[in-house]
Image (cartoon, helix red, strand yellow):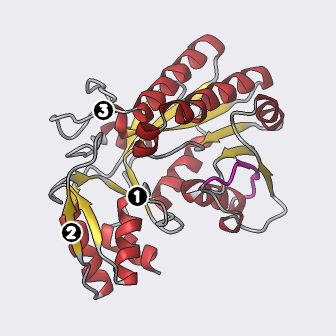
Amino acid sequence: MNVLVTGGAGFIGSHVSERLVALGNQVQVLDNLSTGKRENLPPSELLNFQEGDIRDQELVAECCDQADAVIHLAAVASVQASVDDPAGTHQSNFDGTLNLLEACRKSDVKRFLYACSAAIYGDTEVLPVKEETALNPLTPYAVDKLSGEYYLGYYSRQYGLNTSSFRFFNIYGPRQDPSSPYSGVISIMADRLLSGREMTIFGDGKQTRDFVYVGDLADLLVESLARTDMSGSIMNVGTGKQTSLLDLKSALESVSGKTLKVSFDDPRKGDIKFSCAAVTRLVTCFGKVPTTPIKEGLRELLG
């Protein structure tokens, strides 16, 4: 299979690309390297890297013309960045997605997997969050992700594109860049722990997230490619378990044998207090949920 992975040199994308190559697939990676890195990708004759942007309609059309399937991971994957620059993130997160869908339609691509986000649920008090839960996107990032998912539904119904939207909860693991202040909380926390610097927790630290190890997610996406029974599907990707930031701090300290210094600041605008995925659809479809325990995943991250 020839698979186009947008954002394929990034944190999640590089793990997906690596697994696809290991299984003998031809992989095209399209990445503008705004956060991705060439060195994240495995050296292989099966992998072709194209530096470019999903906002470039001509380039996207060229890439899709060679593809049997698309795994769309490219995005400005930061809630705070979208608050700071709604128009700029919209061009990447919405316009880029629509460019890909339209190119897939014209090129008769068979399969389209989309990275949506738990951010579309907003700050719901109903936990665990089911796919049927009322949607309440609170930030431009969440609005764009939800809008992209709606367009997937349209292209599935109207043109028969075999689409699946995966609502990612909090993904963590190796290659997540801690240098950005908008990076995932686990990568930042691990970086501060190893460097001996203080970590700022926004809020009281009792806020919870459903943390998913990136290797489990990559396996799930790769397995989904060959599925012909999932067209139009939408599902959460989580473990069904909540971990507070204070519990996360303790787990990191236990795994590393080090102490993390923390300070507390006001909650950031748009941040969600509690988050946990309902995983019934995931279990029904795949017979499993991500299984890597948080401490094992943290050991892999710390190296």
Q: Which residue is mark 3?
A: 121
Report the magenta residues as a range.
24-34
The disc, 3 or 2, on the residue closer to the chain's N-terminal end is: 3
Residue 239: mark in rendering: none
Q: Is residue 286 left or right of residue 45?
A: left
The residue positioned 51% from the left and 64% from the top of the image is 177
Distance between mark 3 and mark 2 Cα atoms: 28 Å
Q: Give the percent coordinates (x, y) of residue 44.
A: 80, 65
Distance between mark 1 and mark 3 Cα atoms: 18 Å
Residue 1 visible, this orientation: no
Q: Give the percent coordinates (x, y) of residue 94.
A: 56, 28
The disc, 1 or 3, on the residue closer to the chain's N-terminal end is: 3
Residue 263: mark in rendering: 2
The answer to whether 268 is drawn above or below residue 131 in the figure is below
Q: Nearer the viewer, mark 2 or mark 1?
A: 2
Residue 184: mark in rendering: 1
The disc, 2 or 1, on the residue closer to the chain's N-terminal end is: 1
Secondary structure of the residue carrying tag 1 is loop
